[in-house]
Image (cartoon, rainbow, N blue to C red):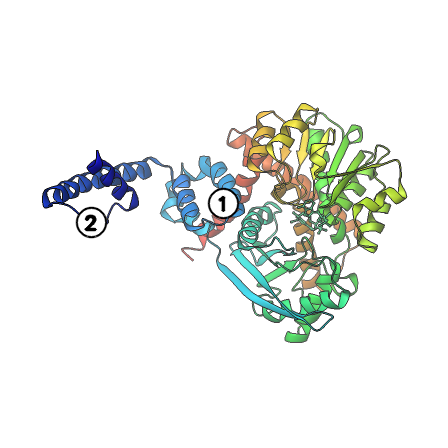
Amino acid sequence: MYIYSLIIDNVSRNCYNRVSVKGGAVVQSLIQITDITLCFFIKNIKTMEVLVMKYSERVLEELKKNNPYQPEFIQAATEVLESLSPVVDTDPRYEKAGLLERLVEPERTIMFRIPWVDDNGEVHVNRGYRVQFNSAIGPYKGGLRLHPSVNLSIIKFLGFEQIFKNSLTGLPIGGAKGGSDFDPKGKSDMEIMRFCQAFMNELYKYVGADEDVPAGDIGTGAREVGYLYGQYKKLTNRSEGVLTGKGLSFGGSLARTEATGYGLVYITEELLKDHGKNIQDARIAVSGSGNVAIYAIEKAEQLGAKVISCSDSSGYIIDENGIDVDAVKQIKEVERKRIKEYLNYHPDATYGEGSVWDNVICDVALPCATQNEINKVEAQRLADSGCYAVCEGANMPTNAEATEVFLDRDILFLPGKASNAGGVATSALEMGQNSIRSSWTFDEVDAKLKGIMINIYYHMKEACEQFDAKDNFVAGANIAGFMKVADAMMAQGIV
Ligand code: NDP
């Protein structure tokens, strides 16, 4: 028994280590022989396991081994690789070309320090990131997130998702994401400016109108994009469309501010229409009160829906009379205050602390705040209380278990990479306008945006039907986004 436990202990520590046990020679050689036999056995079981795994499963296993401290990235990659299985595991060309291994590894990961000085003359150092994930179909494109939670895992998850989202738009843009763990909350305007300048002092080496075109994201709005652009121009002496989400006076596109929220509502409207429902009859719950949330509320209300909630990281508002979007704009875009201030405008509304998803009752949910904001219990609660559609405005706001609940309960579910693609699509339209040194009217851009969102919906639906996954838009979005990128990667050789 003692010998056996020593062997097991030794084997589990490391199959290939030599045994080192104090005691007689007979015992020692016995352990060695048994150890080698066990090692051989275990090694072969492992080899057999690997051999029976599918290509996509093997790549996922390797990815988990190589990125052990990146849960958000693994979560995103797992969802994508699992849904690509019917495509990549039935066509050996992909494995031969190492396509998935290349797809899950960023082309380039840049990390750097951002030293800046606050209003009191104190020096701070934040960490900056730019993950240039995939340029197969066009220059890298994706936002810059400024939030204390930013780390490499989050930027990689966002950059990876961006590849498929950008491909779904039908426009020629590759996938990237960047940001910093800098917290813009409570900083003065001058501190924001000095931080943005310090960020660009390093970032400018890696971006350019035909190379990599960053944009806004959480914590990076028009003000920050303006400061970043100003510093890029100062450093390079070039006036080019290196960033999108710019101010209208220096190359910005009309309707870019509204695009993600409006696009989300356009695709939701099409989804409902295609399933015999009408957005005008819907009671809609929104989370967040930032850029995406505000313009989703605005467009949904313009189309006649009743939006009854919004939130921030402190709490949520429920207003049964319908959210007053002008009040939210005033609180968030002008005064930059907490959402609780809404009660000063509408004392009849209710404010609660915690997550809106623990409390709201709705037909349609539009989560527009941040990743993993809806968990399994909240998903079950939404399904039990009659919610029939969930369309993601934020990136991955529904965690993996919650997504499963929605799919199992036949709730219409649109993943963010499809439903929030209106922002990046309009960014690509801004790039186009910058290239031809011209600008389009609001209505022209808005009409193009609507057309793109409707195309995304039917493109996804087609992929669902082709791969026998009716109404599984998670699979549909991943497959439809993947096909174009995969074709380009196959055509361009092993690079
Ligand atoms: P904003 O910074 O404008 O707004 C984010 C909102 O979410 C704020 O109301 C914020 O509250 C809230 N929030 C942030 N973290 C949490 C949290 N942990 N719990 C609850 N609420 C939280 O960002 P955007 O509106 O631009 O982006 C929202 C989401 O949409 C992100 O996932 C982003 O990646 C995605 N997205 C954005 C696009 C765009 O064009 N802007 C394009 C595509 C996707 P508080 O103010 O308290 O932090």
Asked if the beta carbon under badge 1 is closer than 8 A to the nearest atom of ligand 1, the reply is no
Residue plotted at (74% across, 42% down): 315
Label 1 sits on residue = 74
Above or below residue 484? Residue 51 is above
- Looking at the rendered structure, the secondary structure element under dot 2 is loop
State the image quarter where residue 250 is shown. bottom right
- Asked whether 448 or 394 is in front, the reply is 394
Name the residue tied to disc 2.
Answer: 20
Local SS, label 1: helix
Residue at figure coordinates x 63%, y 55% from the top left: 148
Q: Quadrant of the N terminus?
A: top left
Q: In the image, which disc is placed on residue 185? A: none
Mark 1 Cα shell of 10 Å, populated few (<14), some (14-19), many (≥20): many
Return the x and y of residue 364 as percentages of the image width and height.
72, 31
Q: Nearer the viewer, residue 127 or 177?
A: 127
Q: Is residue 131 left or right of residue 219?
A: left
